[in-house]
Image: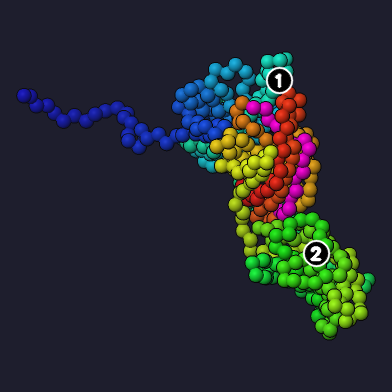
C-alpha cells in the first residue's frame, strides 16, 4: 500500500445542472404522435429555420421571419414551413395558403444569451401527387399540438436581438377585430311619432322549464314597448303571436296611463344576431297592436323598429366546440384548434377539428372582421374575404374536399372578448375534379373564443 497527496482536479467539467437537457420537439401528425430525436436551429438575419426529425426520418420544418416573442404566419410563399415523410417519393407537404394550407407558430420564450427558443405551433400542409392516370390529387397533413421547448439555435449571420412585435392577447381585448360592440339602443315609431325611450332593460324569465328574454323600453311618460323572446329562438324572421302564453314570441304596447295595452296581432321580428352565449341581440321589427279579446277597439302601429341588446353583459369566454352531421352520421371531433393566420391584409380565423377515432377532419376559415350574418362559402381563399369549409374523410391519404356550395352563418360575435357563435352546412367536393365523391355536411354548429 502506498499513499499519495490530495491534488485538485483541473480543467472544465460538466455540472449536473449543465448536463440537464430540457429541450423537446413534439407534435401530433394526422392523429399520430411525433417526437423529434434530433433538432436543428439556424438564425440568419432575423429568420429562424427550425427543424425536428424523428427516428423514422420524418421531418417538421418551420420558417419564422423577424423572430421575437410573438405569433407568426407559417404560410410564406418563399421557404414555406413543411412536413416531409420518410424517404418521400413525392413532394413534401407545404403550408401554402394558395394551396389551402394554413398555420401559426407562437414563440413564448426567446433566450438570446443561451440561444434557445420555446413555443408552440399548428399547421395544415398540402401537397399534390400523381393519381397514376396523368392527373393529380391533393393530400393534407394536419400537424397539431406542436411544442418546441428550449431548442438551441446557431447564429449564422446578423444579430441575436429579437424583433419587437405586438403581443396583445386578442382574446382578452378586442377579440382581434377592429369592430366594437355597440351600446344597447332602441328605436321605433308609434303611429308615426318617435318613441323616445329613457330606459331599455332586459331580464331572463323562467316559465316552467322554458326561459324567455324579456325586453322593455320605457319613455319618460311611462309608455312601454315590451318583447318576450324564447331564449333558444336563434336568428331569422319570425311572426309575433297575438296572445302571450308565457314562453312564445310576443310583443305589446302600453300607453302612458296603462289603460291601453295592445298586443302584436300582426307583425314580425328579424333577428340579425342572437347569441346563446354572448347574449347579444340585434333586431328589426314592426307590429300592429290591438286588443286580442276585442274589448278595446283602439289600434296602434309600431313601425321602423330596431334595437340592440346584450342581455348577458357579464358573459365570459366560451368553450371551443363544434359538431356536425356528415352524410347522416354525427361528427364530434376529439380535438379542436382555433388559429389566427394572416392572409393578405386581414387575419383569418382557422378552425381545425379532428376525430381520431374515425380519422376525419372538418375545418372552417373566415375573416376575423366578419359581421353577424349568412355568407356563401367558396372552395378557396383568393381575395381575402371568402369563407371556406373543408372536409377530409381519411386524413393523410385522401383528397381534400371543399365547400362548393355552402353557407356559414355567424349568429353572434362579441368583439370585446372574441367569442363567436355560428352555424354551417356545405357540400364537399374535389374542386380539381379528380375525386368523384360528394359529402353533405349539415347541422353544423360551433362556438369559440379567439386565441
Give the residue at mark 2.
307
Q: Residue at x 71, y 43 (%)?
A: 442
Residue 147 lies, in percent from the top left, at: 52, 37
Q: Is residue 408 magenta?
A: yes
User: Could one spot residue 361 in this view of the protein?
Assistant: yes
Q: Residue at x 72, y 64 (%)?
A: 230
| Front-most of residues 155 and 254 | 254
Residue 55 vs residue 428: left or right? left
Answer few, some or many: residues within 10 Å of disc 2's Cα (few below 14, many 20 plus, some between 14 and 19): some
**Magenta region's main secondary structure?**
strand
Q: Residue at x 68, y 58 (%)?
A: 276
| Front-most of residues 354 and 371 | 354
Q: Residue at x 64, y 33 (%)?
A: 393
Image quarter hosting the N terminus = top left
**Tag nearer the camera, 2 or 1:** 1
Residue 443 vs residue 49: left or right? right
Vertical comparison of 237 with 154: above or below:
below
Indicate the quadrant where residue 235 lies.
bottom right
Residue 255 lies, in percent from the top left, at: 85, 80
Q: Secondary structure at mark 1?
A: strand
Residue 149 lies, in percent from the top left, at: 48, 37
Q: Quick one: label 2 or label 1, which is nearer the N terminus?
A: 1
How far apart marks 2 and 1 lie (CA) works out to: 53 Å
Q: Is residue 197 magenta?
A: no
| Front-most of residues 342 and 210 | 210
Q: Which residues are magenta?
A: 398-413
Residue 218 lies, in percent from the top left, at: 79, 76
Give the residue at mark 1.
136
Amino acid at each position: 500500500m502506498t499513499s499519495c497527496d490530495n491534488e485538485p482536479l483541473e480543467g472544465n467539467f460538466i455540472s449536473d445542472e449543465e448536463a440537464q437537457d430540457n429541450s423537446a420537439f413534439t407534435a401530433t401528425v394526422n392523429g399520430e404522435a411525433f417526437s423529434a430525436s434530433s433538432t436543428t436551429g439556424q438564425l440568419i438575419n432575423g429568420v429562424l429555420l427550425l427543424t425536428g426529425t424523428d427516428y423514422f426520418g420524418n421531418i417538421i420544418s418551420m420558417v419564422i421571419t423577424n423572430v421575437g416573442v410573438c405569433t407568426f404566419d407559417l404560410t410564406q410563399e418563399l421557404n414555406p414551413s413543411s412536413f416531409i415523410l420518410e424517404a418521400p417519393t413525392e413532394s413534401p407537404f407545404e403550408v401554402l395558403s394558395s394551396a389551402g394550407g394554413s398555420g401559426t407558430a407562437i414563440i413564448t420564450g426567446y433566450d438570446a444569451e443561451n440561444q434557445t427558443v420555446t413555443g408552440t405551433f399548428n399547421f395544415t400542409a398540402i401537397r399534390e401527387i400523381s393519381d397514376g392516370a396523368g392527373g393529380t390529387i391533393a393530400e393534407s397533413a394536419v400537424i397539431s399540438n406542436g411544442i418546441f421547448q428550449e431548442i438551441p439555435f446557431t447564429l449564422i449571420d446578423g444579430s441575436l436581438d429579437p424583433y419587437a412585435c405586438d403581443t396583445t392577447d386578442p382574446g382578452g381585448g378586442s377579440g382581434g377585430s377592429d369592430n366594437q360592440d355597440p351600446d344597447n339602443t332602441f328605436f321605433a315609431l308609434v303611429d308615426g311619432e318617435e318613441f323616445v325611450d329613457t330606459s331599455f332593460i332586459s331580464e331572463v324569465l323562467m316559465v316552467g322549464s322554458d326561459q324567455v328574454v324579456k325586453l322593455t323600453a320605457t319613455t319618460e311618460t311611462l309608455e312601454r314597448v315590451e318583447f318576450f323572446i324564447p331564449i333558444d329562438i336563434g336568428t331569422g324572421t319570425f311572426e309575433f303571436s297575438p296572445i302571450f302564453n308565457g314562453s312564445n314570441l310576443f310583443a305589446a304596447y302600453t300607453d302612458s296611463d296603462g289603460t291601453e295595452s295592445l298586443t302584436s296581432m300582426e307583425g314580425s321580428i328579424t333577428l340579425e344576431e342572437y347569441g346563446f352565449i354572448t347574449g347579444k341581440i340585434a333586431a328589426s321589427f314592426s307590429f300592429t297592436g290591438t286588443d286580442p279579446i276585442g274589448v278595446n277597439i283602439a289600434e296602434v302601429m309600431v313601425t321602423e323598429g330596431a334595437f340592440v341588446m346584450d342581455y348577458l353583459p357579464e358573459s365570459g369566454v366560451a368553450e371551443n366546440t363544434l359538431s356536425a352531421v356528415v352524410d347522416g352520421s354525427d361528427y364530434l371531433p376529439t380535438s379542436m384548434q382555433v388559429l389566427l393566420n394572416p392572409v393578405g391584409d386581414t387575419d383569418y380565423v382557422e378552425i381545425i377539428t379532428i376525430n381520431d377515432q374515425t380519422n376525419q377532419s372538418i375545418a372552417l376559415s373566415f375573416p376575423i372582421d366578419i359581421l353577424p350574418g349568412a355568407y356563401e362559402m367558396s372552395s378557396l381563399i383568393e381575395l381575402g374575404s371568402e369563407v371556406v369549409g373543408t372536409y377530409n374523410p381519411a386524413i393523410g391519404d385522401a383528397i381534400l374536399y371543399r365547400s362548393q356550395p355552402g353557407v356559414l352563418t355567424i349568429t353572434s360575435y362579441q368583439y370585446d372578448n372574441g367569442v363567436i357563435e355560428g352555424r354551417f352546412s356545405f357540400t364537399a367536393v374535389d374542386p380539381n375534379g379528380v375525386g368523384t365523391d360528394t359529402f353533405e355536411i349539415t347541422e353544423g354548429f360551433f362556438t369559440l373564443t379567439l386565441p
